[in-house]
Image (cartoon, grey):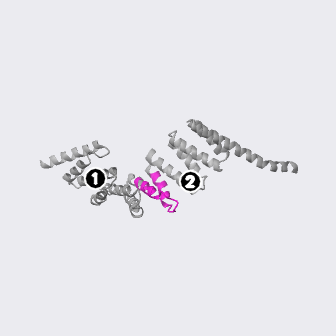
Amino acid sequence: MRKYYVLFVTLLPILGACNAKSSKNQYDLAERLFEEKKYGASVHEFRKVVKKDPKSELGIDSLYRVGVIQRLYLHKPNLAIQSFQSLLSRTEDPDLERKIREMIGEMYFSDFNDFQQAAKLYAILVKDKSPKNKKRAFYLYRYGRALFLMGNFKQALDAFGEIEEKYSDGRFYEKARLALGDTLNSSGQCHKAIKAYEELSKSSDKKIRSMSIFGMANCYEEIDNLDKAYDLLTSIKDSYSTPYVVDLKMKKIKRRKILRRR
């Protein structure tokens, strides 16, 4: 009996090496299928690696690849979310966890318009204030946008305000300032919104500039300064991303001005 036990123990490293080699071969096959654009077959082979070595580096990477393929190539975000959530329970790498939560949050936000679930994911990412979290300003912006679209204006203002305070020299400052104006506008604080928009009306970014002027025009229309609203819309008639929207607004204001004279 002891002889068989010794034999079994001796064979263990060999069996482990064979299993590792088998998983690597399976991974390489999945890679080749992906390169051949056989995405469904590639996912099938990556899943085999995950099943054989669920917590190994190869298994973790395979499950990540499954989620990415499902999201970007098979256009099945619901399955991708399941794969990424499964991966979250297996990995202990904080950088990978951050990346996965960002991708899940983006799918909830963009694919399903589930802003509540998106906000939960971004809230976790925002709480991470470590130096390694280099995208915190972006996460704050997305968190604020999700809150805004949920109608939670107070918390949205806090998120955008934090970007202004802590990331004033970053690429998300102007986006946050514009979102702040939109939030103030939507919550009935038009005079404060106008101040936020006015700063951006001089932006070097053409899109930000025209959107801020459009926001100002909305505010002036809301407080019944129709002449100012009309003049602002006239100034962006040819530069706004959707000119027909500006045209409709101008026609609406023009009708209001005619009715006022009667």
Real-space Cα separation, disc 2 to disc 1, in angstroms: 40 Å
Q: Which residue is nearer to you in this view: 241 or 182? A: 241
Q: Position of residue 233 (x, y in %)?
A: 24, 49
Q: Position of residue 177 (x, y in %)?
A: 35, 58
Q: Which residue is nearer to you in this view: 7 or 153? A: 7
Question: At 47% across and 49% down in the image, what residue appears?
Answer: 106
Q: Which residue is mark 2?
A: 96
Q: Secondary structure at mark 2?
A: helix
Residue at the outermost left position? 262
Which region shows up in magenta?
A: 116-145
* Three-letter residue code for mark 2: Leu
Q: Position of residue 15 (x, y in %)?
A: 76, 46
Q: Which residue is mark 1?
A: 213
Residue at the outermost bottom position? 165
Q: Is residue 120 left or right of residue 86?
A: left
Question: At 41% across and 55% down in the image, what residue appears?
Answer: 147
Q: Is residue 246 left or right of residue 14?
A: left
* Three-letter residue code for mark 1: Ile
Relative to 164, residue 248 above or below: above
Q: Position of residue 188 (x, y in %)?
A: 29, 57
Question: At 60% across and 53% down in the image, what residue appears?
Answer: 91
Assess whether residue 207 is covered by the magenta stretch.
no
Mark 1 or mark 2, which is nearer the start of the sequence? 2
Q: Residues within 10 Å of mark 1 (few under 14, many from 20)?
A: many
Residue 1 in sight: no
Q: How many marks?
A: 2
Q: Main secondary structure of the magenta part?
A: helix
Q: Residues within 10 Å of mark 2 (few under 14, many from 20)?
A: some
Q: Secondary structure at mark 1?
A: helix
Q: Is residue 170 left or right of residue 234?
A: right
Question: At 40% across and 61% down in the image, what residue appears?
Answer: 169
Q: Is residue 146 left or right of residue 184?
A: right
